[in-house]
Image: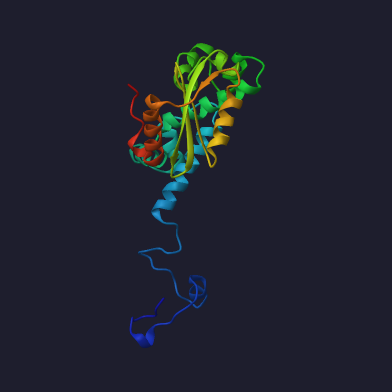
Amino acid sequence: MCGSACQPENVQFYRTREDAEKAGFRPCKRCKPDQASPADQHAEKIASACRLIESAETPPSLETLAQHVGLSTGHFHRLFNAATGLTPKGYAAAHRANLVRKSLNRSGTVTSAIYDAGYNSNSRFCETSNQKLGMTPSTYRAGGSQADIRFAVGECSLGSILVAQSGRGICAIFLGDDPNSLVRELQDQFPKANLIGGDAGFEWLVARVVGFVEAPVLGLCPMN
């Protein structure tokens, strides 16, 4: 930090910004080094919106989320999509689907699991259960009973990734450091399913998911 004129004899150096401020200097009003960068501020806003979605009993509207973080709806929607690879509505759906998965493993009935996850009716969830679970809720709760599940393991920048698909849709995507641990996790999740190791015709699916993990802003292309 410098004094009134940027001449060598007028320059003073300090080890930290705090030391300079104690000496009476102020941060630059243009670059604002004492504030978080715009990228960090945006990340904090998106994280705050995610926490609001996760804590709400019903998915908040786009307008509510944007107002919560102090942004316009259009700007917020673009930032959220770029940061998470999902729209706010898609993030809310994915979060609720994850709640259903957890509830199905601990609730007494399928109905109670669906209601515990915030759905207002069985039929509303069951209409999209193939997309959310890759199978019916009853089959999922029964450990994938009598379901054929194909799976394959790949590698990405986040580590090993396992993708599993039943005849109704993708039912698991696991990330971790050890491929064998991911396979065991799949076996624990679906102990009554017929698990089929990846074949040549299934590798393309893993490649698509890895591409989504590496560049979520591009989205996950529809399956043929």
Q: Is residue 125 above or below residue 49?
A: above
Q: Is residue 17 above or below residue 5?
A: above
Residue 18 left/right relative to 200: right
The quadrant of the rendering that contains the N terminus is bottom left
Q: What coloring was used for the rendering?
A: rainbow
- Tell me residue 38's x, y (percent): 39, 53
Q: Is residue 117 above or below residue 215?
A: above
32, 220: nearer the viewer: 220
- Tell me residue 76's x, y (percent): 38, 40
Q: Residue furthest bottom?
A: 9
The residue located at (48%, 76%) in the rendering is 24
- Tell me residue 202's x, y (percent): 40, 26
The residue located at (48%, 75%) in the rendering is 20
The quadrant of the rendering that contains the C terminus is top left
188, 111: nearer the viewer: 188
- Tell me residue 29's x, y (percent): 38, 65
**Label total for image:** 0
157, 49: nearer the viewer: 157
